[in-house]
Image (tube, rainbow, N blue to C red):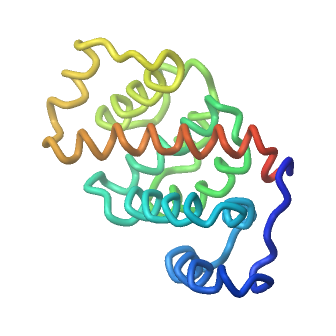
Amino acid sequence: MRIPPVTPGTRADLADLEARILAERGRVSPLYQVLLNSPPMAHGWEQLLSAVRKRNSLTADVRELVILRVAVLNGATYEFDAHVPHAQAAGVSPEAIEALRKVPLAADAPLTPAQRLAIDLADRMTRSITVERELFDRVSANLDTQQMLDLVVTIAAYNMVSRLLVTLEIGH
């Protein structure tokens, strides 16, 4: 790690924040241990990512598939490995999880049309940032406004996560 982690329980000023992270996450992971070096960042991160993961209008399978895909595209192995169990719990098949590792995505990847569209959006947002109107319209055709926003925020948030993990060498 390029920034040293803060060992949980070693700083009294972080006790409340660590307790909130523990309550939301079940543990203070290496990522959060690094974030604890900046309490405002750790707090904001926990609030945003907990909303993305737990208070999101997307189906769990679509949410986890785009998280996995962003991790692959950004080379964030730690994040990919951390989300495989969540994807499995959401009913994503091992074959679909494995298919996400291939760039570009294979035409015969075992995904539903809705999952494939979400992956197409994740690919476009992650690789070139700009999303053409035609793709945006195809993705949003079967989603309500909140779902579309939640999908875009999920992709954007996990680009943030993976880029931090890779830059700071967390999980290497």
Q: Nearer the viewer, residue 110 or 73?
A: 73
Residue 166 lies in what quarter of the image?
top right
Where residue 159 sits: x, y (%)? Answer: 54, 37
Please state if 123 lies on the left or on the right of 29 as rendered. left
Residue 124 image position (x, y, % from top left): 44, 20
- Give the x, y percent position of residue 146: 19, 47
Residues 91 and 139: in front is: 139
Quadrant of residue 167 in the image? top right
Taking 47 as reference, is 166 above or below it? above
**In the displayed structure, does residue 57 sit left or right of residue 161?**
left
Residue drawn at point x = 53 percent, y = 19 percent: 127
Determine the residue positioned at 41% across, 25% down.
Answer: 120
Instruction: Name the residue at the front extreme.
Output: 13
- Residue 112 % position (x, y): 34, 37
Q: Nearer the viewer, residue 89 or 22?
A: 22
Number of numbered discs visible in the structure rendering: 0
**Is 7 drawn above or below residue 50 in the view shown?**
below
Q: Residue at x 55, y 36 (%)?
A: 70
Instruction: Judge left or right: residue 157 versus residue 166.
Output: left
Q: What residue lies at 64% left-to-right and 86% top-to-bottom?
A: 15
31 is higher (above) or lower (below) than 99: below
Q: Quadrant of residue 114?
A: top left
Q: Is residue 168 left or right of residue 41?
A: right
